[in-house]
Image (cartoon, helix red, strand yellow):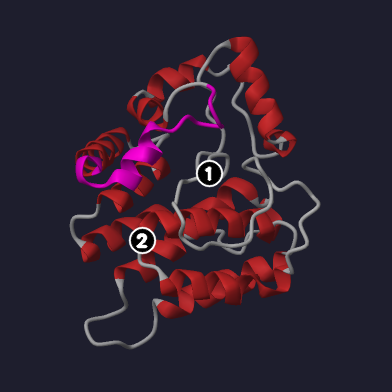
């Protein structure tokens, strides 16, 4: 069976929607990119599209991407806000390779700053999560995060942060294709934590790519079945 590559995903959400509608399967594209995370009224990067992707008509100045993204991340410790902001940043970054590199460099610098007790967990989370979103969306030749194990950094962030179901949710997305045992543990911890985290619960109950297919919770709970359903 044929696995879709990053090049295939240039066709965007329309292609994913076509497979869902025609093949009737819960087709999973790049989970970190093709799904908008709910963040309530929190501030993130400017977004004018009504879909998950850019429309091509945005007037956002991508030369400001690193400074704008860093400011948003520094002002809000909510992991879901970080996930959505880094998702948007990655979409903009493909239009400006220099900005993509600048953003990664700026975030990475934070993990090396001398602070009492070491850098905060979110510094490691942001670098790891951004590295994985870059891998799912940027061309390999333009990806400044090549060679970075983003999942390892997110796991490090979880260890530093302690119990955090939103970070577990992020880790569950990162391990959708494995390792299976760690994926199951992340999913279980995220779903357990969602009982007292309404925004996380809202994200888990949302449907992948709008109102079609499985909810995110359903998708995360049956990755093997989804893989088998891919054409």
Q: Residue at x 53, y 26 (%)?
A: 211
Write the residue at 63% across / 27% down. 16
Apparent side of residue 91 relative to residue 82 in the rendered image (left or right): right
Callout 2 secondary element:
loop
Residue 119, given in percent of the width and then of the height, sits at 32, 78
- Whether residue 193 can be seen here: yes
Quadrant where the N terminus sits is: top right
Q: Which residue is mark 1?
A: 36
Q: Where residue 80 appears, x then y in whole percent? A: 40, 53
- Other-residue count near label 1 (Cα within 10 Å), few / some / many at <14 / 14–19 / ≥20: many
**128 lies left or right of 90:** left
- Quick one: label 2 or label 1, which is nearer the N terminus? 1
Residue under the point 45% across and 23% down = 214
Residue situated in front as seen by the camera: 94 or 80: 80
Left or right placement of residue 12 versus residue 209 in this view: right
Q: Start and end of the magenta stretch?
A: 194-212
Disc assigned to residue 15: none
Residue 142 appears left or right of 120 = right
Pick whichever, 219 or 114, lies toward us. 219
Residue 195 placement: quadrant? top left
Residue 103, quarter of the rendered image: bottom right
Residue 184 lies within the magenta run: no
Residue 204 in the image: state x and y as whole percent: 36, 36
- Residue 137, compared with residue 31, is above or below; it is below
Mark 1 secondary-structure assignment: loop
| CB under 8 Å between discs 2 and 1 | no
Q: Mark yes or no: residue 147 visible.
A: no
The image quadrant where one finds the C terminus is top right
Residue 81 image position (x, y, % from top left): 44, 58
The residue that disc 2 covers is 78
Q: How many marks?
A: 2
């Amino acid at each position: 069976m044929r696995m879709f590559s990053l090049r295939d995903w240039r066709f965007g959400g329309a292609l994913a929607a076509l497979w869902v509608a025609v093949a009737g399967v819960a087709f999973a594209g790049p989970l970190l990119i093709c799904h908008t995370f709910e963040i309530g009224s929190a501030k993130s990067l400017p977004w004018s599209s009504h879909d998950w992707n850019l429309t091509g008509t945005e007037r956002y100045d991508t030369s400001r991407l690193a400074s704008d993204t860093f400011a948003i991340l520094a002002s809000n410790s909510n992991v879901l806000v970080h996930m959505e902001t880094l998702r948007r940043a990655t979409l903009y970054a493909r239009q400006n390779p220099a900005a993509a590199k600048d953003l990664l460099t700026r975030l990475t610098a934070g993990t090396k700053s001398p602070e009492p007790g070491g850098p905060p967990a979110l510094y490691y989370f942001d670098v790891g999560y951004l590295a994985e979103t870059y891998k799912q969306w940027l061309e390999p030749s333009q990806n400044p995060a090549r060679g970075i194990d983003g999942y390892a950094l997110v796991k490090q962030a979880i260890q530093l942060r302690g119990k955090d179901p939103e970070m577990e949710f992020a880790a569950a997305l990162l391990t959708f294709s494995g390792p299976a045992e760690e994926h199951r543990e992340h999913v279980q911890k995220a779903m357990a934590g969602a009982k007292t985290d309404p925004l996380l619960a809202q994200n888990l109950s949302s449907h992948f790519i709008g109102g079609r297919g499985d909810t995110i919770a359903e998708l995360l709970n049956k990755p093997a079945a989804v893989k088998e359903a891919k054409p």
